[in-house]
Amino acid sequence: MAAYAQFGRLLGVSARLLRPLVGSSCPSTGFPSQATRVSNRMPLNPIWVIPGRTMFVQTQDTPNPNSLKFLPGRTVLEEGTMDFGGPRDAYCSPLARQLFRIDGVKSVFLGPDFITITKSDANMEWKVIKPDVFAAIMDFFTSGLPVVNEDSKPSADTAPSDEDDEVVAMIKELLDTRIRPTVQEDGGDVVYRGFEDGVVKLKLQGSCTSCPSSIVTLKSGIQNMLQFYVPEVESVEQAGYNSRMLIEGVLTGSFRIFELFHSHIAS
């Protein structure tokens, strides 16, 4: 903690994090290839339009074949994200409740401008579910109902708190500025659950939850990134597990941020 002896140095946190991972022209959205400078984000699928309706909804594949990202072209949540693992969890969201009425929907994840649907049966083709999801989304947004009830707002897990010390403040800022935006592009999220005894606890949401590659490379990605900027971090652990099972990965698509990170520290 010697490097954080002066609390006033917390004001320099943002300056430390402004160092680009590759060069100095990294764009604000997406993470470009170091060689081509072209974004590696998942491409958008063709726009779906239902005759007689004025709303356009696009879909975007995620690294999890059982999850699909729907972009309604308007704000879904004003802030934060919300993850619903089943109909019982969706009591606070009229939108989620409507989506759970569709046969084959296992979970619903709401982001700033997208909705990620995870199907319950891997053998069920998306072409069977998508028309009902499109119709439900369009019907909901034309109904004027709130996405989330007034008394149930998403928790701001990385919001600054008076109780945060310098280490926790830097961890939260890294998650917000370096990690979370990329993971959300792939239809998921990483939620901060605490820091204790050198261990950062995170929770995977959305398409990350059941992604086949979600336990592959996170330890050499998020953990190394946090340790690079915050030496006090010893490991990263998935919240909600009884054992100290380390997360080994988030998403194949999100791994691009970690590849850039390794290129940065190797140069």
Image: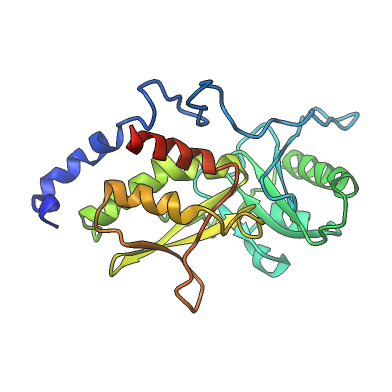
Residue 51, quarter of picture: top right
Q: Is residue 119 left or right of residue 28?
A: right
Position of residue 212 relative to residue 238, above or below, is above
Residue 99 location in percent, x, y?
A: 77, 54
The mark tally for this picture is: 0
Outermost front residue: 266
Q: Residue at x 24, y 61 (%)?
A: 163
Q: Residue at x 79, y 62 (%)?
A: 120
Residue 158 visible (yes or no)? no
Position of residue 29 relative to residue 202, above or below, is above
Residue 173 location in percent, x, y?
A: 34, 45
Outermost bottom residue: 242
Residue 231, quarter of picture: bottom left
Residue 235 location in percent, x, y?
A: 36, 62
Which of the image's four quarters has the N terminus? bottom left
In this view, the residue in front, 251 or 115, is: 251
Q: Residue at x 64, y 33 (%)?
A: 74
Q: Is residue 148 left or right of residue 236?
A: right
Q: How is the image coloured?
A: rainbow
Residue 13 location in percent, x, y?
A: 23, 41
In this view, the residue in front, 37 or 192, is: 37
Position of residue 80 relative to residue 238, above or below, is above
Q: Is residue 55 left or right of residue 19?
A: right
Which of the image's four quarters has the C terminus? top left
Residue 191 visible (yes or no)? yes
In this view, the residue in front, 148 or 20, is: 20
